[in-house]
Image (tube, grey):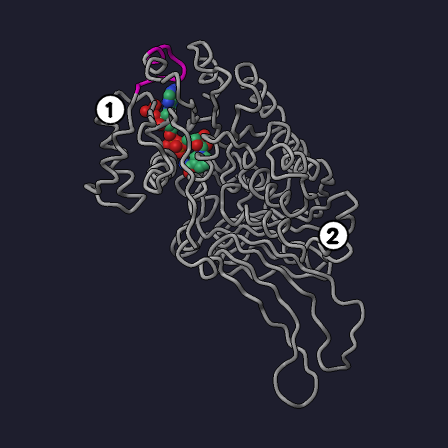
């Protein structure tokens, strides 16, 4: 299978925060890989901007080092040498006046203009305002906004309003890098390009859905940021909400940005408030090798959760009566992200006591080893009557797609190219983000009002015992967390 690379049009991309971690680890190596793939015209410009005083040559040296480290190429690779020619740098303070005229002067009239805000969200308003006052917020320019998009409904709404003063909604690209993952997009392909699943994709046939995003790392190194967010703000309100939407939404009339986002918004609006009894929060304890959550954030009284499990209900015709169980946490047994759809058992078994049919289960693995696994019942081979056994129909995308499957583009590569193409399908719309906060806020408020503490769990475990009980109460079990 040969992948088709369709080059994008000539562009000028400005990266605010170009000296930062995200730019060095993800954005610039991602652009380099797209350049190598032949997707970026050699005439395009990538202009770094940050407060650090340096010239184009110094910036290129720093970017070359970052790409050598994160994209696995040699320093003298001719493709890297060629890519560096696209780069320039302007020293700019988002809150100051210096550098803006120079930046405006470097932008070419006949190229697409995109501005990536890879800086703290508190600077987004300053950047938008200065781009506008220097004539760079024209109708065809785009801004890319990193997460977190607000920390509650009020702040997200305020941010939306600030950006809306200078940019229309169709110019704003709110990043949720989960949406750029190849397998997350595959959720839509699996659901809407096959006749097989859709007739069963409802409360009549689906018993429940489990969405798991488990990490082995703790918060050490970013404890002070994380402690203000917790798992609900860091993972549930954005990434897990997006996965939930893609699983639960109605088929859009077309694979078109607003058609897809309209359907996702309907799911978020149909989410029922979550009762405190349906949520379990946890904090990891230390082990020989590493500290506890409380050590890592340096606050013995912190009530912020490093783990959360919750039972979520969607109030609409399709999903009435089918719970969605979400869980995510740090320092868990394995690093894995998956969605498991457990179907109901057949209404009647024609087989005697030779093994009743078990429920079918479809597991979509997002990482590691992206793929799908469908558990089906078959006859156990051999003579001696009809004995049933459940077996997996297992497919790894990497194996199924050959070389192309081994080299799937990183989420950032895909998303940045979509910005240049002007395709917003995989970006969150302002009303979607606000609706997600409107659902999340009461959950956070009720926890903050309570005096409860998160349940402790052992580092390297599957999370707190109480999370198991959340499932057992409903006569269900979590899937094992394993890589
Ligand atoms: P970072 O490493 O702290 O980098 C921040 C960047 O902002 C630096 O380039 C810094 O450069 C620049 N900056 C700071 N103040 C500025 C100002 N007044 N004017 C202009 N530039 C300024 O942060 P990061 O990790 O790259 O994160 C950037 C954004 O991405 C944040 O919104 C973060 O939440 C989001 N994000 C990051 C990750 C990640 O993996 N790192 C993941 C998801 C989302 P100077 O000091 O030279 O000005």
Lower position in the chain sequence, tag 1 or tag 2: 1
Q: Quadrant of the N terminus?
A: bottom left
Q: Give residue 303's quadrant in the image.
A: top right
Q: Please provide the residue range marked out in magenta.
A: 90-101
- Residue 98 in the magenta stretch? The answer is yes
Residue at the extreme left of the image, as rendered: 76
Quickly name the residue at label 1. 56
Numbered marks: total: 2
The quarter holding residue 392 reads: bottom right
Q: Residue at x 45, y 9 (%)?
A: 133
Q: Magenta residues: mostly which secondary structure?
A: loop
Residue 389 in picture, x, y percent from top left: 64, 76
Q: Which mark is residue 202?
A: 2
The crowd level at tag 2 (other Cα within 10 Å; few <14, some 14-19, many 20+) is some
Front-most of residues 1 and 224:
1
Compared with 232, 140 (above or below) is: above
Coordinates of residue 151 in the picture (x, y in percent): 56, 30
Of residue 152 and residue 259, the one placed in the foreground of this image is: 259
Mark 1 to mark 2 CA distance (whole Å): 56 Å
Is label 1 within 8 A of ligand 1 (CB to nearest ligand atom)?
Answer: no
Is there any visible trace of residue 230 in the rendered image? yes
Residue 106 magenta: no
Is label 2's Cβ within 8 Å of ligand 1?
Answer: no
What residue lies at 55% left-to-right and 28% top-to-bottom?
150
Q: Quadrant of ligand 1?
A: top left
Where is residue 370 shown, x and y percent of the image?
49, 55
């Amino acid at each position: 299978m040969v992948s088709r690379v369709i080059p994008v049009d000539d562009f000028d991309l400005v990266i605010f925060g170009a000296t930062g971690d995200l730019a060095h680890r993800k954005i610039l190596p991602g652009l380099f890989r797209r350049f190598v793939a032949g997707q970026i015209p050699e005439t395009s410009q990538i202009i770094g901007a940050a407060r650090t005083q340096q010239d184009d040559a110094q910036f290129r040296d720093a970017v070359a080092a970052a790409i050598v480290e994160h994209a696995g190429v040699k320093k003298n690779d001719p493709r890297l040498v060629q890519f560096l020619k696209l780069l320039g740098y302007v020293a700019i303070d988002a809150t100051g006046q210096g550098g803006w005229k120079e930046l405006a002067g470097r932008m070419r009239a006949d190229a697409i203009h995109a501005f990536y805000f890879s800086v703290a969200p508190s600077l987004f308003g300053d950047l938008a305002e200065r781009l506008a006052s220097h004539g760079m917020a024209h109708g065809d320019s785009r801004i890319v906004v990193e997460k977190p998009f607000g920390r509650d409904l009020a702040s997200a709404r305020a941010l939306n309003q600030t950006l809306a003063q200078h940019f229309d909604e169709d110019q704003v690209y709110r990043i949720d890098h989960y949406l750029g993952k190849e397998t997350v997009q595959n959720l839509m392909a699996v659901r809407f390009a096959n006749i097989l699943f859709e007739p069963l994709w409802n409360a009549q046939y689906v018993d429940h859905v489990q969405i798991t995003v488990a990490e082995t790392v703790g918060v050490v190194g970013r404890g002070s940021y994380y402690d203000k967010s917790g798992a609900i703000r860091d993972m549930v309100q954005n990434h897990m909400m997006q996965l939930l939407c893609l699983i639960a939404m109605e088929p859009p009339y077309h694979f078109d940005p607003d058609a897809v986002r309209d359907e996702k918004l309907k799911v978020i609006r149909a989410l029922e408030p979550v009762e405190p009894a349906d949520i379990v929060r946890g904090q990891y304890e230390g082990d020989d090798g590493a500290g506890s959550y409380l050590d890592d954030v340096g606050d013995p009284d912190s009530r912020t959760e490093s783990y959360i499990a919750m039972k979520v209900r969607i109030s609409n015709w399709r999903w009435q009566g089918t719970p969605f169980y979400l869980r995510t946490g740090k320092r868990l047994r394995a690093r894995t992200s998956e969605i498991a759809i457990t179907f109901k058992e057949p209404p009647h078994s024609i087989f005697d006591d030779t093994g009743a049919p078990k429920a079918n289960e479809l597991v979509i693995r997002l990482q590691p080893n992206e793929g799908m696994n469908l558990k089906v019942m078959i006859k156990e081979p051999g003579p001696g009557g009809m004995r049933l056994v459940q077996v997996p129909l297992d497919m790894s995308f990497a194996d199924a797609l050959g070389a192309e499957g081994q080299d799937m583009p990183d989420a950032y590569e895909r998303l940045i190219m979509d910005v240049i193409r002007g395709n917003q399908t995989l970006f969150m719309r302002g009303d979607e983000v606000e609706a997600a906060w409107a659902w999340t806020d009461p959950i956070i408020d009720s926890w903050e009002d309570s005096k409860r503490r998160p349940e402790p769990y052992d580092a390297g475990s599957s999370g707190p015992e109480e999370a198991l009980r959340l499932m057992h109460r409903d006569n269900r079990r979590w899937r094992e967390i394993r890589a």
